[in-house]
Image: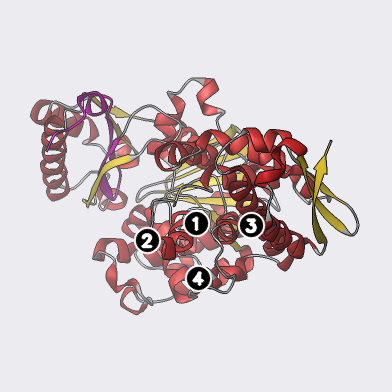
Amino acid sequence: MFEDTAKVEAYLAVIDIGSNSVRLVVYSGRQRVPDVIFNEKLMVGLGANMGKTGKMGRAAITLAVSTLKRFTALCRQMNVRDIRVVATAAVRDAKNGKAFVERVEKECGLNINVIDGHQEARLSGLGVLSGEPTAKGIAGDLGGGSLELVRLADGEVHETISLPIGPLRLMSQFGNNRRTIKKFLRDTFAEIPWLDNSEGQNLYLVGGAWRNIVKLMMRENSNALPILHGFASAKSQISAYARRISKLDVADIPFASSLPSKRRGVLPVAALILVELLAAMRAKTAVASSYGLREGLLFDALDKSVRLEDPFLFRCSLLAAERSRFAQHAHVIFDWSRPLFQRKSVDPALRDRLHFAICLLGDSAWRGHPDFRAEKAVDSVLHGNFVGLSHRDRAYVAVALNQAYGAAIDTPHLAPTLSLLKIEDIIEARMMGAALRLAQRFSGGTVKSLTVSQLRLTKAMLYLGVPAEYEDIANDVVLRRVRALAQLIGRKAKIEILP
């Protein structure tokens, strides 16, 4: 097997030494949304004894060093030359933290950057913004030994704080005394003056324990779309679920048996922290983020112009370039379809963004079997590795692509996610899909016919205006597509010949 040497040399790795786990992630390079080439973690538990002894345990250190040796060897085999190693609360606060850093440097050849709490919070906040540039509220990154909070607004990181209240540390300090932990949390949160500044906004959930709580909640509720990133839950719903989890024995948590025992063990306390934080900041919604400190570290190193790129559209553009025949036509089709969408929208910028993504992805499944192209296109959106969009956004784009490939709205590969949309959203998405389907049939993959033709909408009619010299390509096949689009809008259809 031959590897692209240039691509391999662009790889970079982040090793994250946390209080609970040690993880290696190898990324494809410095770009707005890099691919994950390799991802491995081990539950080490460096912070398990911090609350009692103030030190990392010997067994945990031995396991961590062994894991870091393996990660170093893997990076060497993958020819990864840029390796960034960060350590957080356990190493930062442990009495034997300095000795651990020196041992790792000697035995593994790794230089560990032990970041302080405010830097950890800042990087976690940048990671959330990397995956959701419009994030507004508080990002909370819960590790085993600490909780980092950062206020996000206007695409920027504002106030930050690092708190010594990770589940491992609290359990080591207070055992399983729920009442004592709750009082400690309330007293701690009450001392943060800027927490009230995000009242009625979002709490963005980062960290393995909270992400696992969200996954278990989604599974218990048979969520229409089992994708972590972008999942949003009203405060009342997730608080009720987390409160119930916080009172259960670990063995009784529904669906948690698939998790490693060390992950399961922290869930009740992690759930209690979540309940108290949601109440303290008076959040409106909790939103899951699959991006955090590691992604923030990469995002922070990018040029400002690259950071400003839309992460969802960036990924759509890459997929279009790789899979589409006419990727360069996306802008033309988008402009050509605008006369259909003059009606006011709650968020016109979001609508335009999703419509442009639909234009980019509209031809991405053409290599698939004709009977399954719609299914392939829908699956690539619903389950693709995208950030910068909500579950509702995924469903909207999927409905449009399903329509663009001529599939029924109640097809099994799409129907379960329709509950994520309002009926007017479904109609609008189908209109965009039908417009794309018309554009592709009418143009035959050429730009010229789209630039000289136009769509025109009146109270009763949908017109496709075509210059006389292009009349031959606007036959009955095209008229059928115009009629299909007009039917969705509630109009009659006609092809008009322009002078």
- Secondary structure, mark 4, is loop
The image quarter in which residue 280 lies: bottom right
Foreground disc of the pair 1, 4: 4
Type of residue at label 2? Phe
Q: Nearer the viewer, residue 357 or 339?
A: 339
- Residue 246 location in percent, x, y? 45, 70
Q: Which residue is mark 2?
A: 174
- Residue 379 location in percent, x, y? 44, 60
Between marks 3 and 1, how big is the CA–CA gap?
Answer: 70 Å
Q: Nearer the viewer, residue 117 or 428?
A: 428
- Secondary structure, mark 2, is helix
Magenta stretch in the rendered image = 1-27
Q: Decide which of tag 1 and tag 2 comes sooner along the chain.
A: 2
Question: Do the residues bearing badges 1 and 2 touch, measured as CB atoms within 8 Å?
Answer: yes
Is residue 20 rendered magenta in the image? Answer: yes
Between marks 2 and 3, how big is the CA–CA gap?
Answer: 73 Å
- Residue 302 location in percent, x, y? 45, 23
The circle drawn on residue 223 is 4
The circle drawn on residue 477 is 3
Q: Is residue 276 visible?
A: yes
Between marks 4 and 3, how big is the CA–CA gap?
Answer: 40 Å
- Secondary structure, mark 1, is helix
Foreground disc of the pair 4, 2: 4
Q: Decide which of tag 2 and tag 3 comes sooner along the chain.
A: 2
Q: Residues within 10 Å of mark 2 (few under 14, many from 20)?
A: some
Between marks 1 and 2, how big is the CA–CA gap?
Answer: 10 Å
Up/down of 31 relative to 209, above or below: above
Type of residue at label 3? Val
Q: Residues within 10 Å of mark 3 (few under 14, many from 20)?
A: few
- Residue 401 location in percent, x, y? 56, 56
